[in-house]
């Protein structure tokens, strides 16, 4: 029987030995058997592992498509065991394959895609969850959109009409292009108001700072306007010729009062100085003819000009140069006689938050402040005067703040001595402490009034009496003692939530030049 085999399956040396054996067998065959009419089933043993493999095939003559028949029609089957061939020389086999150019090309396997680890999977799921959670908050309720219906963020952006943005460098949020919500509008309005408030506050602070600097400069200039007794001037002497050198000699001497007045009238030709005006404050009067006096408390750093206008409260927001200023200028009522001095001379001034004008008067709210400076200097353009403090108290300006009553501390003229002493009694009842300074019916008093912030429309008042001729300026401050129950306005007790023990106390009224008391 003829055996069909693949010659490439065996090494070269074994293949030659088989050929020789086949030739010898062919020579020994007496006669060739008749070929079968149909194909045969051939079984041979592969040389790699010795296993038997079954193939359906045909003899060489029957390989033609014309003579082929289906395998199930083959009748004669011959099975032959092919002996296992020992495989020797693997390298030699590979070399032979290379020589025959039949060595299969070895290709590296395609790299497998990197599989995410468990942490990466959890992180991506969390990001997807947060993305859907954020997007669901932005979904308009009226559109009835279900977030799970979107397969990608892009589809969501298209339906919701938003722009894709990133948070911390990662996609997953959107910025609305639709009109802002009510809450967002409120937030924007609050932010705008806050920014505007900050800008306005900075502008106000800047304006206050500039006003303070300007007012401070004015106060510094006031001291230069005061003409002191030691003021002198420098005059040039006549030139003297000298053969060796020629020089100018100068001498310094004090000008007489007449010379200084002559110089003032020359410097201010349009100013008519009143008869009897003091030279000390003549420059103030030359600048503003409403100037009537000067108040000074050295230890409290107060040194201010005082004016008087025919228009009430004209200087409430103007300085001595009649320029608009929130600091104003201390002023006296229109009916005060500044040449002869009334029973009571009243001076009003602002209590500024920066500590200027009459703000230092707050020191007199305590006995220690009184002991620091018990004497006030208040001069008019006609004379120089000093005053000893007798009381300091808190009052009101609105009658509704004290059961329809305002203590009339700002009266000016009072001819009745008994009524004046009755006023002094009520005054000391309201005073925060007793200074120990005595007062009689013939004395004249000075009243300094400023704002107080213990309650709305409050006033803090300091009262001093004029030092009598020949009296010592010294004050025995050891006699001062605290008033345990001073009389305050009703508004003070209401704010402190205390009972007013003076609700039905005697009231003192002032009507022009007379007064009346009520029990």
Image (tube, rainbow, N blue to C red):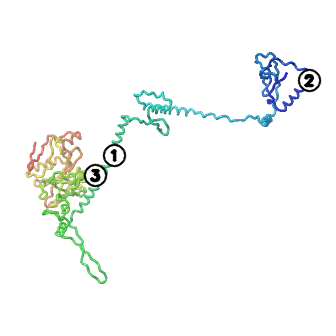
- Front disc: 1 or 3: 1
- How many marks overall? 3
Whichever of labels 3 and 2 marks the residue nearer the N terminus, that label is 2
> Is residue 401 visible from the viewing direction of this image?
yes
Q: Is mark 1 on a helix, strand or loop?
A: helix
Mark-to-mark CA distance, 1 and 3: 21 Å
Q: In this view, does 42 lie to the left or right of 352?
A: right
Q: In this view, does 165 lie to the left or right of 71?
A: left
Identify whether 358 is placed above or below 138: below
Vertical placement of 198 versus 49: above or below?
below
Vertical arrangement, residue 11 with respect to residue 196, above or below: above
Residue at which label 1 appears: 198
Secondary structure, mark 2, is: helix
Q: Residue at x 42, y 27 (%)?
A: 144
Secondary element at tag 3: loop
Residue 446, image x, y percentages: 16, 54
Question: What residue lies at 48% left-to-right and 27% top-to-bottom?
Answer: 149
* Quarter of the view holding residue 140: top left
Q: Which residue is drawn at 23% across and 41% down?
A: 495
Mark nearest the camera among 2 and 1 is 2
Mark 3, residue position: 354
Viewer-side residue, 72 vs 415: 72
Pinpoint residue 261: horizontal percent, then vertical percent. Answer: 17, 67
Q: Distance between the residues labelled 2 and 1?
A: 123 Å
Left or right: 513 as drawn, with respect to 220: left
Lower position in the chain sequence, tag 2 or tag 1 = 2
Dot in front, 3 or 2: 2
Q: Which mark is residue 333?
A: none
User: Is residue 368 visible from the viewing direction of this image?
Assistant: no
Give the residue pinned by disc 2: 28
Which part of the image, by quadrant, shows the N terminus? top right
């Amino acid at each position: 029987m003829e055996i069909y085999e693949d010659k490439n399956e065996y090494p070269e040396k074994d293949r030659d030995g088989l050929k020789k054996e086949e030739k010898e067998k062919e020579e020994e065959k007496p006669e060739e058997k008749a070929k079968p009419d149909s194909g045969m089933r051939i079984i041979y043993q592969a040389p790699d592992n010795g296993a038997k493999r079954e193939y359906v095939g045909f003899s060489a003559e029957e390989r033609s498509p014309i003579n082929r028949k289906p395998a199930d029609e083959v009748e004669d089957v011959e099975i032959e065991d092919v002996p296992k061939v020992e495989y020797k020389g693997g390298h030699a086999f590979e070399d032979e394959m290379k020589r025959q150019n039949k060595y299969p090309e070895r290709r590296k396997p395609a790299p497998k895609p990197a599989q995410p680890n468990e942490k990466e999977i959890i992180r991506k799921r969390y990001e997807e969850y947060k993305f859907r959670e954020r997007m669901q908050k932005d979904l308009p309720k009226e559109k009835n959109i279900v977030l799970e219906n979107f397969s990608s963020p892009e589809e969501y952006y298209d339906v919701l009409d938003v722009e894709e943005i990133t948070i911390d460098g990662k996609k997953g949020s959107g910025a609305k292009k639709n009109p802002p919500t009510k809450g967002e509008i409120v937030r924007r309005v609050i932010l705008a108001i806050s920014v505007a408030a900050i800008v306005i506050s900075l502008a106000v602070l800047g304006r206050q700072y500039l006003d303070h600097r300007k007012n401070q400069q004015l106060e510094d200039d006031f001291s230069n306007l005061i003409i002191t007794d030691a003021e002198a001037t420098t005059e040039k002497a006549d030139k003297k010729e000298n053969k060796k050198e020629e020089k100018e000699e100068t001498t310094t001497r004090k000008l007489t009062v007449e010379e200084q007045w002559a110089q003032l009238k020359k410097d201010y030709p349009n100013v008519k100085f009143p008869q009897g005006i003091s030279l000390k404050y003549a420059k103030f009067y030359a600048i503003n003819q409403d100037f009537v006096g000067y108040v000074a408390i050295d230890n409290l750093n107060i040194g201010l000009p005082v004016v008087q206008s025919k228009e009430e409260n004209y200087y409430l927001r103007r300085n001595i140069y009649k320029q608009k200023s929130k600091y104003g200028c201390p002023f006296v009522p229109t009916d005060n006689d500044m040449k002869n001095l009334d029973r009571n001379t009243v001076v009003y001034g602002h209590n500024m938050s920066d500590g200027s004008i009459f703000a230092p008067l707050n020191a007199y709210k305590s006995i220690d402040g009184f002991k620091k400076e018990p004497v006030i200097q208040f001069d008019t353009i006609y004379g120089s005067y000093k005053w000893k403090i007798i009381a300091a108290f808190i009052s009101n300006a609105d009658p509704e703040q004290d059961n329809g009553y305002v203590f009339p501390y700002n009266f000016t003229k009072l001819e009745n001595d008994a009524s004046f002493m009755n006023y002094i009694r009520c005054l000391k009842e309201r005073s925060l402490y007793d200074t120990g300074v005595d007062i009689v019916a013939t004395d004249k008093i000075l009243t300094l009034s400023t704002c107080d912030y213990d309650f709305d429309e409050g006033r803090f008042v300091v009262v001093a009496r004029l030092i009598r001729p020949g009296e010592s300026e010294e004050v025995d401050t050891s006699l001062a003692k605290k008033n345990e129950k001073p009389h305050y306005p009703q508004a003070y007790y209401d704010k402190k939530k205390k009972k007013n023990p003076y609700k039905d106390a005697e009231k003192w009224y002032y009507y022009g030049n007379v007064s009346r008391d009520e029990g």
